[in-house]
Image (tube, coloured by chain):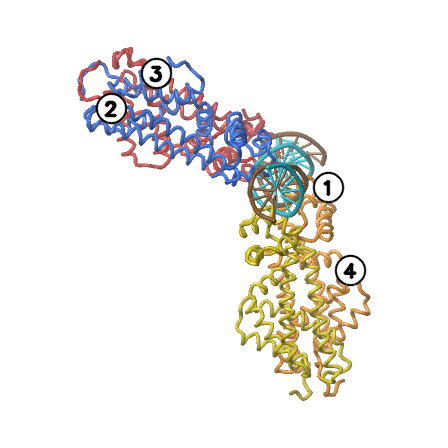
Chain colours: A red, B blue, C orange, D yellow, E cyan, F brown
Amino acid sequence: MPTDTFLNLPQAKQDKVLNAAIDIIKAKGYDKTSISDIVKMASIPRGSFYQYFKDKFDLYYYLFDLIQTSKMAYFKSIVAKFEDRSFVDLYDEIVMAGLKFAQENEDAFMLGYHLYKASDATVQKLWLNMEQRGIEAYEAFLWQDQKKGFISKDINVTVVAKMLYHFNAVELLKMIYNKESEAKIRALTHETIEVIKYGVLKNEVKR
Amino acid sequence: MPTDTFLNLPQAKQDKVLNAAIDIIKAKGYDKTSISDIVKMASIPRGSFYQYFKDKFDLYYYLFDLIQTSKMAYFKSIVAKFEDRSFVDLYDEIVMAGLKFAQENEDAFMLGYHLYKASDATVQKLWLNMEQRGIEAYEAFLWQDQKKGFISKDINVTVVAKMLYHFNAVELLKMIYNKESEAKIRALTHETIEVIKYGVLKNEVKR
Amino acid sequence: MPTDTFLNLPQAKQDKVLNAAIDIIKAKGYDKTSISDIVKMASIPRGSFYQYFKDKFDLYYYLFDLIQTSKMAYFKSIVAKFEDRSFVDLYDEIVMAGLKFAQENEDAFMLGYHLYKASDATVQKLWLNMEQRGIEAYEAFLWQDQKKGFISKDINVTVVAKMLYHFNAVELLKMIYNKESEAKIRALTHETIEVIKYGVLKNEVKR
Amino acid sequence: MPTDTFLNLPQAKQDKVLNAAIDIIKAKGYDKTSISDIVKMASIPRGSFYQYFKDKFDLYYYLFDLIQTSKMAYFKSIVAKFEDRSFVDLYDEIVMAGLKFAQENEDAFMLGYHLYKASDATVQKLWLNMEQRGIEAYEAFLWQDQKKGFISKDINVTVVAKMLYHFNAVELLKMIYNKESEAKIRALTHETIEVIKYGVLKNEVKR
DNA sequence: CATGAATGAGTCTTCATTCAT
DNA sequence: AATGAATGAAGACTCATTCAT
């Protein structure tokens, strides 16, 4: 967590520092970002940095937290609408909501992308934690579906949650990062959930 | 590629260097491994390193190559046996073969794991390349299955290939890395392929 | 150019660094001077050096510039006095002015001497540039003399300028460097300009 | 001096080593030439180098000597023809002979050029020595001229020798290195010696 | 609190030379 | 005599963090 000194700074100055960090990370990636770069870009004195943040990681964690929080808030508002409908039927919409979030919060998205690529062990732990929470959210939805009878009882929902999550985390992320067309993303998403829903086998009755 | 100087070294000495590098990478991760670390652990003089390898990456690429080659050889021998059977039916066995490889070549596996986590741009490119080849292998199998009528014609096999691949690359890798029991891995694999085969919906006739 | 960090340092400290560099260059020559040497002699930490100068050359260029500037200022003040008189007649005085400068700015002179001997390509380019400017100054004087009728119209003044310049750059420099007596230098200079004025052939009436 | 081991090598092998050294020096300049480069280019084992030459400089000195010797031989043969004529009148021819030598022995010339640019103290001493000998040769000619009454008795021939020598060493060398046209070189040489012969002052009868 | 200079361990890499076979 | 591996000091440069004002 940043120091109170930082938190009490006028918002504009806080943003200057944060945006500088974001810009540098976007340009050089997390691992190659140095404090030198940040203080130079933010035009704050070197010493101030350590009056704002305990150390290098303190800033990064804070940044990470900011993304998380905004993402969470966003998704909560989306999910609230879904109420009684089935997750697998809503999947398309959820993914598209994620896309919309990425488009509207490009900084947050890009930063997340670079953090995902970071090799620093602590950052990776952070990331794994977030991954875990994402998977759990999917799981929760799928449990609901199972309870409501939308999906079969003998399915291991964790497996499904993870399969969808990782596919998203890699393939969709890449498409968004490469700014592929919405149509393409939508198509892929649809095909994905179709497989999950009906499986790949020909036309047999199940089991 | 290492220099001839290195390649002409007695195998024991080559191994000493390679193993030192592997040990350090396992301990600190790729990105934080320094040449200092390696020469210290291998107890070779600083200058020798550069008589063996052009630079830091030369060693890494070589290591990477070593893994790749042994993995490839292994899988080729496995896959040869499968001939006319369906990929989705053989999936369990393929995964278990991967597990066996990991168990028998722990160093290669561990190193691969750390390379996967590396943030260095060149290493990532290498990795993406390998990922691509892995996905393509799955795809090829699935195409065969589709041609042979094992799986439905309207399935986008690329999607399925990627879904399985990423799930493996993350979840199975993690389980192997954490040395989870074979039974658990087998169970998870089975559940995965079941979802892929039959989908999650209850018991309806398809589409 | 040095960083502001350096320029804002108390003059005494700036001098400490600059003088350290000069001393080392005088002792070992430009090419063999290392940053290690300089920081050791200046007793500043290794890192400080790079907070003062972008790199090794940044310091050298700055030093070079310092010499250039002081030399220029000096010569401008000298030359201003000459106005309407002939260059070839004033040559003795100009050389002696150079000598006086060298005596009064021994460091600048010595450094210039070592820079002249440097083999580093960039430094040599710098030096050639300075040489060019020196030759052009002589040329300009000689043109004036030619225009004013002091010297013959069919003389290639560039040739004369270069002859005098190179002779100075090597022989006089050497004498000054070796701290030969002023009388000796004066005599040599006189003989030189006599040759240039009247030539070496016998029969003409001289003086 | 090279070891007997080297001198006893078949001429072809000696040349291979020498030419390798020359090629590298031409490409990278004296100061940046490393033994690594040479042994690689000559394809001789690293250890052999030290069986042929005491150290790095031993080779360089030898190379230097080779040039010197061939240059000397060449000039002696030229000068022999001049006998009773005046040096100042023959100057043009002497310079052109130098040019011809450079054209016919490009390697020797180029190597000399790079040695001239070298910053290594020992090499420079070598060079100064050669310079001294060159100047003395000019001086000797001019003394002869003076004794024979070709040039005025009150001329300091050393000054003239040095003036011509340095002018050549810089300006002509540069022109030859840049492969300027023979006509240009001839013209410049002529203008130079004219100045030396008749001086620059106006009023006397010339030619 | 702001400022920015100070610090020195650490990074990769090159090189001339020696030594064992 | 030939070979080529061994050696480690030295080079330029970076960086996160601390400290004095």
Cα distance in 3D space between marks 2 and 1: 71 Å
Numbered mark located on residue A194 in the image: 2
Cα distance in 3D space between marks 3 and 4: 87 Å
Cα distance in 3D space between marks 2 and 3: 21 Å
Q: Give the secondary structure at mark 2.
A: helix
Circles 2 and 3: CB distance less than 8 Å? no
**Relative vertical location of residue C178 with respect to residue D38 in this rendering, above or below:** below
Tell me the kind of residue under disc 1. Ser
Q: Nearer the viewer, mark 1 or mark 3?
A: 3
Read off the chain for label 2. Answer: A
Cα distance in 3D space between marks 2 and 4: 89 Å
Q: Where residue A14 appears, x then y in whole percent?
A: 52, 32
- The front one of D47 and A178 is D47
Q: Is residue A108 visible?
A: yes
Q: Would you name the residue on which mark 3 appears?
A: B188
Instruction: Give residue D97's quadrant in the image.
Output: bottom right
Numbered mark located on residue C104 in the image: 4
Tell me the kind of residue under disc 4. Glu
Badge 2: residue crowd in 10 Å (few <14, some 14–19, many ≥20): some
Q: Give the secondary structure at mark 4.
A: helix
Q: Give the secondary structure at mark 3.
A: helix
Circles 2 and 1: CB distance less than 8 Å? no
Q: Looking at the figure, which quarter contains the N terminus of chain D?
A: bottom right
Q: Is residue B88 left or right of residue B69?
A: left
Q: Where residue D143 appears, x then y in whole percent?
A: 74, 78
Read off the chain for label 4. Answer: C
